[in-house]
Amino acid sequence: MRLFIAVNFSVETCVRLIRLQDALRAVATRGRFTTPENLHLTLVFLGSCTPAQTLAAQAVMDAVAFSPFPIAIDRLGRFLREGGDIWWAGVQSPEPLMFLQRDLADRLRIAGFQLEDRPFHPHITLGRDIIAPMPTKTVSPFGETVCNISLMESSYTAGKLIYTPIYSVLSNTPEA
Ligand code: ATP
Ligand code: MG
């Protein structure tokens, strides 16, 4: 199973993200846009996992402790790619988010997962293979309080990319 750990969003946040996509779609000459149900913030990408690794990842999620914390989306950006860029909505990096991501990654490594070493740049992919002029970078900040994280399975079903939550944990310490 191809797995990653992510934050999923409320309907309200998704609606705001869809509006950003719509603005981008209006100026793009090309692109594949993330479907609304697939909008998410990846914390850690695990890749292909055995059933034993899947259980180990769940145990790590059980072991991390985090209080609910707010996140805010405040800008647009892109990763330049040959033939079409990846466009994303940038998430601010408050300490609780960064700490949770680091804690998960550290514990997963201790549990034997070989994770990529690239620094964590919290973002929500809005679309791929996009050819568009750079629009205004800043957006009026919006967001929500993160109260749970999910282990997601990434699969192709009938040619359609589907992310399915297979395990979730709630914040387990009181709000700071
Ligand atoms: P596709 O690869 O089919 O175009 P996708 O990238 O959305 O679609 P996955 O590759 O399964 O689907 O990735 C799931 C999530 O993990 C996405 O948010 C993706 O950006 C992220 N991700 C994938 N590979 C890595 C990686 N090597 N490092 C960090 N994040 C990754
Ligand atoms: Mg990918």
Image (cartoon, rainbow, N blue to C red):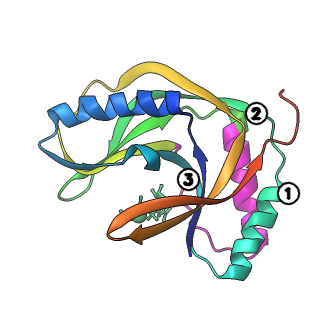
Camera-near label (2 vs 3) is 2
| Residue underneath mark 3 | 119
The stretch of residues the image draws in magenta is 97-122
Q: Name which residue type carries label 1.
A: Ala
> Which image quarter is the N terminus in?
bottom right
Gap in angstroms between the C-alphas marked 1 and 3: 23 Å
Q: Which of the two discs, 1 and 3, labels the residue nearer the N terminus?
A: 1
Q: Say what secondary structure mark 1 lies in.
A: helix
| Beta carbon of the mark 1 residue lies under 8 A of ligand 1 | no
Residue 118 in view:
yes
Q: Position of residue 161 (x, y in %)?
A: 39, 62
Q: Which of the two discs, 1 and 2, labels the residue nearer the N terminus?
A: 1
Q: Whereabouts is ligand 2, in terms of quadrant?
A: bottom left
Q: Name which residue type carries label 2.
A: Pro
Q: Name which residue type carries label 3.
A: Pro
Q: Position of residue 9 (x, y in %)?
A: 56, 38
| Residue underneath mark 2 | 68
Residue 63 is marked as: 1
Residue 18 is marked as: none
